[in-house]
Image (spheres, helix red, strand yellow):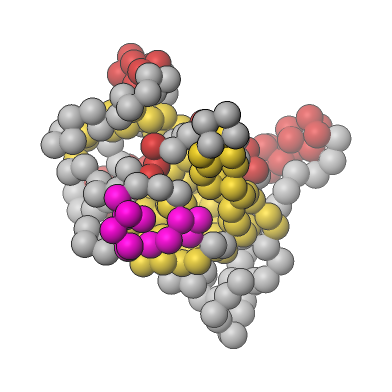
Amino acid sequence: MTKNTELTTVKAGELQVAGLGADLALMDELIQTTAYLKRIQLYSKGKAIDTGKIGPGNYGIHGTEDIKCLGDEIDIFPLCMRSKAIDSSDRDAIVITYDAKSAEFQRIKETSDVQDSGCQWGFAFLVYERSTDEFYEFFCGTTSARFEVANIAAFLPKTPAQVEALTKELGHAPQAAGPCTLKRRYLENKAKDWGWFVPVTHPCSTPFKGFDPVKANEQIAKFEAMEGSKVEKAPDDESQRAR
């Protein structure tokens, strides 16, 4: 899917692989002015749907006052991935950590199994979205979404060493870095008579228009520079809590 008519092939080789040889000077500069990325999420239930801001089963860009609906499928280029855990039990003081080995992360992970705990853990992707020509976070923080993490991660940039290791492990060359299409699937819990939407990853063969590797590398550095244990204002929507 695309609204663009002028296309160009993304040169994934021009992208840095996050965490390997990142420009520390650039990170130091960006960390002084880092604003949290807007986020894309798949809306399934919650206040945003109840108030008519977006329909269920649609991807949307979360805003403070409104939500931009992107439809039921989007084309993205996954650029890097980080572990992430969120404790929003106190809606005025949300705790976020990116350190999967920390005690705080493990506490949130364990507590996430408790219903309505306000805790989530999973993996946050930095992605470039085609139709808006912008960078976003896409957080896979529910049980169902985490099942799709490996499929999205397959499209991430890789070092030559990683390609070699994956080829040996898989018995064939891994998925090349590049864009993919996120669609949705509806799951049902028939015993409880309710359901929810989950993301599903498909290859995207259409080249992206206007993709700037220099800007992408700057966003990768910014994404990697974001610190954990941050206190943020609670989001207005709770659809991410769906299983």
Instruction: Residue at 71% x, 66% y: name it.
Output: 205
58 within the magenta span? yes
Residue closest to the eye, 143 or 77: 143
Instruction: Tell me where residue 58 appears, x and y as whole percent.
Output: 48, 59
Is residue 14 rendered to the left or right of residue 222? right
Residue furthest out toward the bottom = 5
Residue in the image at 65% along x and 43% along y: 151
Quadrant of the rendered image containing residue 162 = top right
Q: Which residue is depicted at the point 17% across and 43% down? A: 233
Q: Which residues are magenta?
A: 47-59
Image position of 31 with respect to 102: above or below: below
Point out the image quarter for the N terminus.
Answer: bottom right
* Residue at position x 79%, y 37% in the image: 167
Q: Is residue 50 above or below residue 112?
A: below
* The residue positioned farthest toward the left in the image shown: 92
Q: Nearer the viewer, residue 217 or 116?
A: 116
Residue 113 appears in the picture as rendered: yes
**Location of residue 122 in the rendering, given as x and y in whole percent from the top left corner:** 46, 32
